[in-house]
Image (cartoon, helix red, strand yellow):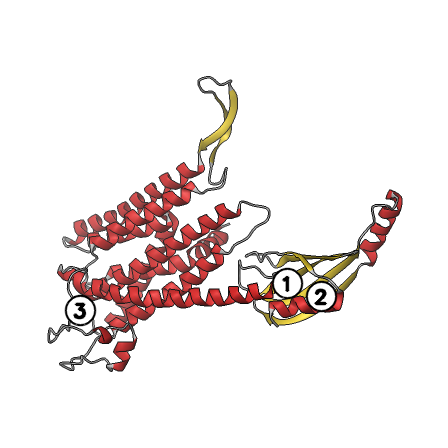
Amino acid sequence: MSIGGIIRTIHNRYGLSPVKAGQCFRGSDLVLATSFGAEEKTGMIVFDRQDDSLRMLRVQQKPAFRESEPYSDQRKNRTQSQSDHTEHTLHISKCMASRGIRAFARASHESTYTAGVELSSLVLIGSFVLGLLLGSFMNVCISRLPVGESVIGGRSMCRSCGKTVRWYDNIPLLSWVILRARCRDCKAAISWRYPAVELATALWFLRSGSILWRDWNFTCDFCNQYQIQTNRVILDLAVLAAGYLLIGLMVMDWQTHTLPDSFTLSGIVLGFALTCVHAMYLAPGEGEIHLHRQVKLNSAGAGRSTGDLFITGPEAVVLGRVVAVAGAMLLLLLFHWGYKALRKREGMGMGDVKLLGMIAAFFGWWPAVLALFVGTITATAFAVIQMARGRADRLTELPYGSFLAIGGLITAMAGPMLIEWYAGLLR
């Protein structure tokens, strides 16, 4: 049943009409959805959320009290109504409601909800198409950056025959299928890497676009809605940008064992810039670090007072991110120097050090540690499998940056949840 159908059913059955649009909040099982009222009837609608869908709707009706009644009568009626109020349960089969998006709209504006659904569909389609286009550009970067070619000038050409690729043979994903993975001129095979990168980037943008749209439409009647919206959107953009760079670095290191500075160092700068913008929109008092004891504080022109504020929220975020980037890079540098001192040969490139620094710039210290842990586990598992199959030995070089990028992608998608779960095991 659609949202409009729910509202019509409530209006016809209970004679209630919506007077205020409510919100669907993430992380709550029982959510206040909408207040309803008509003449002498008042009530509210609440729903229980399971698996991000509405499964049950309960309408509570309470009689309104007239101001002309004596206070004693009002109190008596109120007590009776609290014990005898009627509850009507309306079971709904998985109606459409996504996290953070308005669950109900005014009955007189059903078309607004329909238009919102259509607009969200356009946003998702646009995100997917944009991901395909940027995935095609990522393929250009993967092919040209490791060999020192420009990614801006020059048309795409076949690596086998050197012929320029026609525009209609350069449509992301579709051209590879139409050409059956063959060059139109020389019939040389086209690597599956091209459609894989385009599809992976498109899916990443589709996921990020849906989250961005949800957070952009976040509403709150009792908090600073603009501030929360802006903070969420900034964090979503950071995840989007980090994932895009990590996909490219993962493929580049796998094929060429190189991690270009144009990606890693630029990623560190971009991640830190987004962190600074995020710090600007922190709520008052958010992220502050306080001392465990109060100290005497005074300033020029002010009286002496007590306080325990050590670092403000923006300072804590920015300085914490600087420490995270430096600490993550130093951690891998220690491994790099230690391995070289023991084995007398290189065991890890500086590109891996910069890559972990980029992950820390986007997400912070503990997410970077999580990415390093996941990357090390997956790299070790891959090495064991390759050695068991006789395809590698203990001197074979592994594209560790690719596995580190995989750890970064997992961190971007589920980092806070995994860190919280692990911290819960230690408590």
Residue 172 found in image quarter: bottom left
Mark nearest the camera among 2 and 3 is 2
Residue type at the position of mark 2: His
Residue to which mark 3 is pinned: 156
Residue type at the position of mark 3: Ser
Q: Judge left or right: residue 204 versus residue 195.
A: right
Could you tell me which quadrant the N terminus lies in?
A: bottom right
Q: Nearer the viewer, residue 351 or 68?
A: 68
Q: Earlier in the sequence, mark 2 or mark 3?
A: 2
Q: Is residue 53 above or below residue 328?
A: below
Residue 8 found in image quarter: bottom right
Residue to which mark 2 is pinned: 11
Q: Secondary structure at mark 2?
A: helix
- Separation of residues labelled 1 and 3 (CA atoms): 54 Å
Residue 393 found in image quarter: bottom left
Q: Which mark is on residue 293?
A: none
Residue type at the position of mark 1: Ser
Mark nearest the camera among 1 and 2 is 1
Task: Please state the horizontal and vertical placement of residue 174, each as a whole percent of the image.
Answer: 29, 77
Q: Judge left or right: residue 310 versus residue 19.
A: left
Q: Residue 412: in sight, yes or no?
A: yes
Q: Secondary structure at mark 3?
A: loop
Q: Which mark is on residue 108?
A: 1
Mark nearest the camera among 1 and 3 is 1
Q: Judge left or right: residue 61 versus residue 301.
A: right
Q: Earlier in the sequence, mark 1 or mark 3?
A: 1
